[in-house]
Image (cartoon, rainbow, N blue to C red):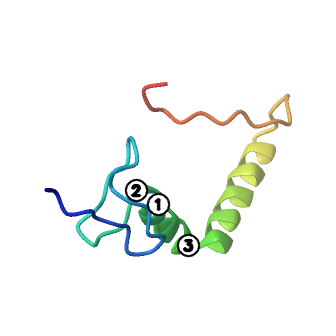
Amino acid sequence: MTRMRYCSTCILPHARPNIRFDTNGLNCNCAAAEKKAAVDWAGREKMFRELVEETRIKGARYDCIIPVSGGKD
């Protein structure tokens, strides 16, 4: 009989469909939440605002941003 594994944070069982665990015993969703909490959001906002300002300085005809991931989508 297989021993039931649980996430060390939210106690979701490994029997849930499409769930994966990392080496620390966190499921993929809890691990992603930890990474997101560690992001310097104020620094990211500053970088974003600088990028927008650079675009405005160039005299672009349009004042909008279209986000793209550059990934497989």
The type of residue carrying mark 2 is Cys
Write the residue at 74% across / 44% down: 55
The type of residue carrying mark 1 is Ala
Q: At numbered mark 3, what does the secondary structure look like: helix, strand or loop?
A: helix
Q: Are marks 3 and 2 in contact (CB under 8 Å)?
A: no
Q: Mark 3: give few (<14), some (14-19) or many (20+) Cα within 10 Å.
A: few
Q: At numbered mark 1, what does the secondary structure look like: helix, strand or loop?
A: helix
Give residue 38's position: percent from left, percent from top: 51, 75
Marks 3 and 2 sit apart, C-alpha to C-alpha, by 14 Å
Q: Nearer the viewer, mark 1 or mark 2?
A: 2
Q: Residue farthest to the front?
A: 1
Marks 3 and 1 sit apart, C-alpha to C-alpha, by 9 Å
Q: Are marks 1 and 2 in contact (CB under 8 Å)?
A: yes
Name the one closer to the observer, 2 or 64.
2
Write the residue at 35% across / 67% down: 6
Give residue 27's position: percent from left, percent from top: 38, 60
Q: Which residue is mark 3?
A: 37
Q: Which residue is mark 1?
A: 32
Q: Mark 1: give few (<14), some (14-19) or many (20+) Cα within 10 Å.
A: few
Q: Residue farthest to the top?
A: 73
Q: Which mark is residue 20?
A: none
Q: Which residue is mark 2?
A: 28
Quadrant housing the N terminus: bottom left
Give residue 20's position: percent from left, percent from top: 32, 52
Name the one closer to the observer, 73 or 54.
73
The type of residue carrying mark 3 is Ala
Q: At numbered mark 2, what does the secondary structure look like: helix, strand or loop?
A: helix
